[in-house]
Image (cartoon, grey):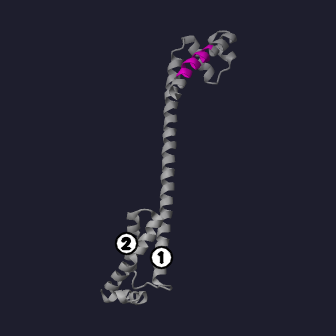
């Protein structure tokens, strides 16, 4: 039994402030078990509980010259431990929120990428299908889709009736709906 074991917490704290390493060791031995139990009860993780106790006592040693304890040493250690655990919980919560926001971002970005890919693929298919329309129907359809010509103007330009223009556009749309619609059905499944 060392002489330090018989010292009170106040005596050990006074020696600690003077840089006495044996006083520090005695305080560590005296409180590590009970503090570990308390930390483990809150954290439910052996390694985390050990880490937080080690960190608490390491900080106690590093700040030994400036430490001001206005209550009992045990109260000071418990409050310091509790605050460290709460900070750890807060960091976990922040890390969890960050991970969740990153996960959401990745899912949305993935979805955005999928939509852009679908858009490009659909545009390519529509272009191919428009190009596969019979020549007269394709010409009428393209003129109507550019939006600058009315059916009447298209009829005049191509020297056909307005009714023929309407029918050609209608038939082109029906063909495109059928071919592109089947693509969308397959893609969405």
Q: Is residue 6 above or below residue 174?
A: below
| Relative side of 175 to 7, left or right | right
Residue at which label 2 appears: 54
Label located before the other in sequence (1 or 2): 2
Q: Is residue 188 left or right of residue 12?
A: right
| Residue 179 screen position, x and y as percent | 54, 18
In the rendering, which numbered label is found on residue 163? none
Whole-percent x, y for residue 35 in the image: 43, 73
- Which mark is in front, 1 or 2? 1
* Residue at the disc numbered 1: 78
Residue at image location 39% in from the left, 83% down from the top: 64
Q: Nearer the viewer, residue 153 or 44?
A: 44
In the displayed image of the protein, which residue is found farthest to the front? 1
Q: Residue 99, how many percent across, how many down?
A: 47, 52
- Say above or below: 15 vs 118: below
For label 2, count other residues whose C-alpha is less than 10 Å away and answer few (under 14), some (14-19) or many (20+).
some
* Residue in the image at 44% along x and 62% along y: 44
Q: Is 118 located above or below residue 142 in the figure?
A: below
Instruction: Please give the range of residues in magenta.
Output: 171-182
The extreme left residue here reads 1
Q: Residue shown at 56%/15% (left/top)?
A: 138
Q: Give whichever of 87, 159 is nearer the camera.
A: 87
Instruction: Tell whether 173 sits left or right of 59.
Output: right
């Amino acid at each position: 039994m060392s002489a330090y074991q018989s010292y009170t917490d106040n005596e050990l704290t006074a020696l600690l402030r003077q840089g006495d390493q044996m006083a520090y060791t005695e305080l560590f031995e005296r409180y590590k078990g009970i503090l570990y139990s308390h930390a483990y009860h809150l954290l439910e993780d052996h390694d985390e509980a050990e880490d937080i106790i080690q960190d608490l006592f390491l900080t106690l040693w590093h700040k030994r010259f400036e430490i001001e304890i206005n209550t009992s040493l045990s109260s000071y250690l418990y409050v310091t431990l509790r605050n460290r655990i709460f900070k750890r919980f807060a960091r976990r919560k922040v890390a969890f929120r960050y991970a969740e926001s990153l996960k959401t971002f990745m899912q949305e970005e993935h979805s955005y990428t999928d939509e852009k890919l679908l858009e490009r693929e659909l545009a390519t298919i529509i272009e191919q299908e428009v190009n596969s329309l019979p020549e007269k129907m394709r010409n009428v359809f393209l003129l109507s889709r550019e939006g600058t010509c009315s059916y009447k103007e298209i009829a005049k330009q191509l020297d056909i009736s307005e009714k023929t223009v309407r029918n050609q556009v209608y038939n082109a749309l029906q063909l495109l709906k059928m071919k592109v619609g089947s693509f969308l059905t397959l893609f969405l499944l």
